[in-house]
Image (cartoon, rainbow, N blue to C red):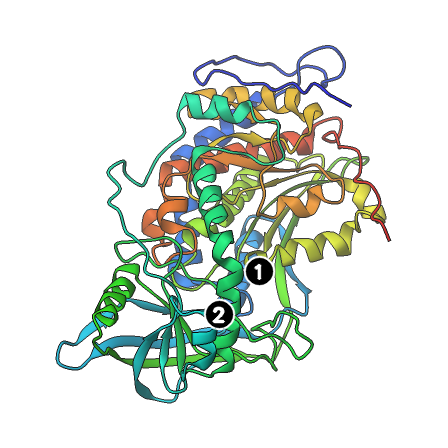
Amino acid sequence: MFRTQVVWFVPLLLTVGLSAQRPAGSGVAEPVDEAAVEFFLAEGLQRSQVMDHLSWICDVHGPRLTGSPNLANAQRWAVERFADFGFDAHTEAWGPFGRGWRCDHVVMEVVGDNPWPILVHAKAWSPGVDGRIEAEVVHVAAMTQEELEGADLRGKIVLLDDPREVAENFAGVSRRFTAEDLLALADQLGSEARDPAVRAAAARRSELRAGFQRRRQMLEIVQRKQPLAIVDRGSKGEYGSIFVSSASAAPTADGGRGNPRAADAEVLPQLTIAVEHYNRICRVLAKGLAVKVALELRTTFFDDDLNDRNVVATLEGSDPELGEQLAMLGAHFDSWHSGTGATDNGCGSAVVLEAARLISAYCDVLGRKPRRSVRACLWSGEEQGLLGSRAFVREHFGTPDEQTAEHARVAGYFNLDNGTGKVRGVYLQGNEAAAPIFRAWLRPFHVHGASTLTLADTGGTDHLAFHAVGLPGFQFIQDPVSYDTRTHHSNMDVWDHAVAEDLKQAAVVMAAFVWQTAERAEMLPRQPPPPPRRR
């Protein structure tokens, strides 16, 4: 059946003053609490604490790999910070997740007549090596399966990937959405948003898929041959930016995919090096010259508690009838380990904390708490598959097939997880009924760059856990800045690449949306629940 969908796009510079009116659905405009918005703008733009939150998250407690002591320390700090804002805060365990991990020391360098240091990061859950080792380098990417099966790799350091061409980016790496970009985004009707940065990343993933199966087969063969270490160069990054995530484990006894976090996993030392250094080694080897590398790698595994935790903070509602309902906001707190987890996703977490502070401060001005309870969550395990948010939703709200009584209490959930960029609007996840509501709520922020609504979905982050069980979960649209090109999962994901003015604006928008949700006469509209799963 063909169905026409309506998409709203509001010109960026349009400003409309709104006064409180009856709820949407009554034939008049959606109400907007102008006094609250005015307070959030003044407090959030002039006296913001968001960059201080972010410094604690990144400089003091970063990186925050799930299961690591750093994340546990950050969670304790966040509980205390939420408590300072008047929230009842605690951590909730979920799991089991598996062993925690930390890289304590890593050095790699070419040795011999022409020595030089290599920019390197260990992959998460990689074991260490015994002291300082020196070994010859073997490049296996161009080998056939037969050649690889016959190669003697024991005692060697293996380069797994082909060299990657590095081209100068004359267009620059940081960008904001233009009006044309936002209009194209608003026109999206499909299941996934396609802004230019996302399209570029999708194209790169498409290219990678073609070689993925062969690479996986090569890796399994290499792992069986027990080299000293496996080295790759990442699919993107240059000028010393290294994009690194998790080590790979050998397949399980029954042929399944190994989990490097499991205590019985077979994992070889694995590292990612800067592409320029990887390419240089490959070029020397291609000339028939030997390359010898020295490696030092010390890592620590933590297996005293195989669970991890989410931070949950609640400001109880004041309305006798609506107080048990929840206006929710969240971001993931965990990160990868080479940087300090700033744009992914310390920024989102700092914005959640600042939005909570703004809401609490406005309650002090009003002399009352919001009508509905406000619940802020900082998730862990997002980088490994939205594990923390999915566990929380499953525990509190149920599954797509069977919802809990608490499911009916959720008025809406707002998520932030696309870097440091300012909020430009909202992904509606196909929820057309929410569009006129959000259109009204965005109007005070047109002059601050936020005016776009798109019916398109966006994936890869924690609002999906809510959306999957029929709850109204939304992710904000953000300017890409340098997220995909420089910081996302890289060693350059650090505090210095966060844009303070953008994060101030994002915290104000998030506070306003959550406050309006908490105060609204009705909960946000829900989409029909997903069909039952086939047994």
**Residue at the limit of the structure toward the bottom, as seen here:** 130
- The residue wearing badge 1 is 384
Q: Disc 1 on helix, strand or loop? A: helix
- The residue wearing badge 2 is 218
Q: Residues within 10 Å of mark 1 (few under 14, many from 20)?
A: some
Q: Is residue 195 above or below residue 338?
A: above
Q: Is residue 72 above or below residue 176?
A: below
Find residue 337 and report its image quarter: bottom left
Give the residue drawn at x 59%, y 49%: 86
Whether residue 231 is visible, yes or no, is yes
Residue 164 or residue 304, whichever sits in front: 164
Relative to 4, 171 lies left or right: left
**Residue type indicated by callout 2:** Met
**Residue at the limit of the structure toward the top, as seen here:** 27
Whether residue 366 is visible, yes or no, is no
Q: Nearer the viewer, mark 2 or mark 1?
A: 2
Q: Is residue 16 above or below residue 281?
A: above
- Label annotation for residue 254: none
Relative to 233, 66 lies left or right: right
